[in-house]
Image (tube, rainbow, N blue to C red):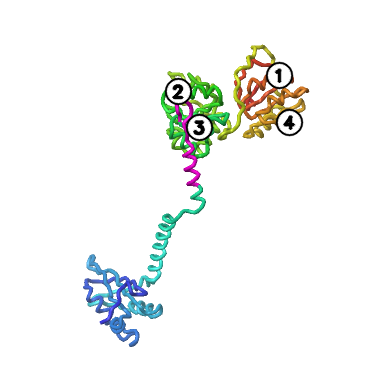
């Protein structure tokens, strides 16, 4: 007798059985063959279809509970859709199995080919994923990998202490000081080349000398150790700005977005100096005042050789119109490293780069009303502006004390 397996079948008839009594599996199979015999004609006789391999082995799953028998019947079929549905419908005419009343209901007719097709699709997805991961990367991936390797290779040794550093330390007017070699590598990877590491707990002489020549930003880990390094650096070096990695994170592990956010949020060292006393070493400095920074950005070197006499002067108060105008112009300048020179009517006489501001002020013959700049108010700017009877100078930061000049020196936070 020829038979087909469920694997070779095109369809599977799923039927449920409920019998009012206890019967065995052979009784159920015998009822299926016996009560459908002659019902559908010779072409759809179950015994003949099974003998020809058009109907597969009839599987019965049954269990007895509380004197009643229930379960399921599975019939594989290689007939077409219509003939398979006719066979399924014929099962529902069975009303007795053995001496007991019975009810059979076809729940569904499963298309085995759909299941096989789904299996093929899922396997194809797995194979495609493996292929994509194992084949040669595209040109962009190659370019990114090469760029990363080059940036990491750019790490150098700087000074007599042979400190790990980026290649732009000599050329840049501003440097970022970090704790270790791994921090330098992470910043190099993300495009910051003006980075140098302390490379230990004590501050090397190279860092001390460098801080006297360039604008320095100290970038430490977001833990108590970062505060300790800040306090040590502040006691021996001339630190201008300070920033920290997010709480609990180290500079070597943060992302490019976190690096940029931290550097934009840097603050003047004077703001956190009082919070770094030994008795307050565990207190986190307040990094809330935001200041923009870019890798290798050009900034006028801080000059500290212009003595200024303490004086008692009455500063000119800003009008509401001036505050609004100065605030808008300051926001417009952020990130440009430039300066606006204004007349008494708040008209812009000119915009110049910070590197040319002192020279421009010295060359002017007429008075100016105000100077707004994207950077720190330096003493050489103030001295040059005093000659022009300048009333106000507004910058992102300032170390000029109120009694050192008759100019009203303000920061963007003051307006």
Q: Nearer the viewer, mark 1 or mark 2?
A: 2
Is residue 400 on the magenta stretch?
no
Residue 195, label in figure: 3
Sooner in the amino-acid sequence: mark 1 or mark 3 = 3
Residue 203, label in figure: 2
The residue tagged with tag 4: helix, strand or loop? strand
Q: Nearer the viewer, mark 3 or mark 4?
A: 3
Q: Looking at the image, which residue is at 75% across and 28% down? A: 346
Residue 183, label in figure: none
* Mark pair 2, 4: CA separation: 43 Å
Tell whether 165 sits left or right of 89.
Answer: right
Sooner in the amino-acid sequence: mark 4 or mark 1 = 4
* Residue on which disc 4 sits: 350
* Mark pair 1, 2: CA separation: 39 Å
* Mark pair 1, 3: CA separation: 36 Å
Category of crowding for the residue at label 3, using alpha-carbon neighbours closer than 10 angstroms: few (below 14), some (14–19), many (at least 20): many
């Amino acid at each position: 007798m020829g038979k087909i397996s469920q694997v070779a079948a095109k369809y599977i008839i799923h039927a449920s059985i409920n019998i009012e009594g206890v019967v065995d599996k052979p009784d159920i199979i015998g009822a299926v063959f016996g009560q459908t015999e002659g019902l559908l004609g010779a072409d759809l006789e179950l015994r003949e279809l099974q003998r020809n391999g058009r109907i597969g082995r009839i599987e019965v799953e049954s269990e007895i509970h509380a004197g009643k028998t229930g379960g399921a019947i599975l019939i594989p079929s290689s007939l077409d859709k219509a003939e398979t549905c006719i066979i399924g419908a014929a099962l529902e005419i069975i009303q007795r199995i053995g001496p007991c009343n019975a009810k059979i209901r076809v729940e569904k007719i499963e298309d085995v080919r759909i299941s096989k097709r789904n299996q093929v699709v899922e396997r194809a997805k797995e194979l495609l994923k493996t292929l994509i991961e194992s084949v040669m990367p595209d040109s962009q991936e190659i370019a990114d990998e090469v760029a990363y390797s080059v940036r990491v290779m750019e790490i150098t040794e700087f000074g007599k202490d042979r400190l790990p550093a980026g290649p732009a330390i000599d050329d840049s007017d501003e440097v970022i000081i970090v704790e270790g070699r791994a921090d330098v590598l992470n910043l190099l990877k993300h495009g910051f080349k003006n980075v140098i590491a302390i490379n230990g707990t004590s501050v090397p002489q190279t860092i001390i000398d460098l801080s006297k020549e360039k604008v320095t930003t100290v970038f430490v880990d977001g833990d108590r150790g970062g505060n300790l390094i800040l306090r040590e650096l502040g006691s021996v070096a001339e630190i201008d700005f300070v920033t920290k990695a997010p709480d609990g994170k180290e500079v070597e592990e943060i992302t490019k977005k976190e690096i940029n956010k931290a550097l934009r949020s840097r603050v003047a060292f004077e703001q956190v100096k009082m919070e770094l006393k030994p008795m307050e070493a565990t207190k986190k400095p307040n990094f809330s005042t935001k200041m923009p920074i870019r890798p290798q950005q050009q900034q006028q070197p801080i000059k500290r050789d212009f003595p200024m006499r303490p004086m008692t002067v009455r500063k000119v108060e800003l009008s509401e119109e001036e505050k609004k105008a100065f605030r808008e112009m300051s926001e417009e300048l952020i990130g440009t490293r430039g300066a606006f020179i204004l007349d008494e009517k708040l008209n812009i006489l000119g915009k110049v780069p910070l590197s040319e501001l002192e020279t421009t002020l010295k060359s002017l013959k007429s008075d100016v009303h105000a100077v707004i700049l994207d950077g720190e108010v330096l003493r050489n700017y103030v001295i040059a502006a005093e000659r022009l009877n300048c009333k106000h100078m507004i910058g992102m930061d300032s170390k000029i004390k109120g009694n050192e000049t008759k100019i009203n020196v303000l920061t963007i936070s003051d307006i």
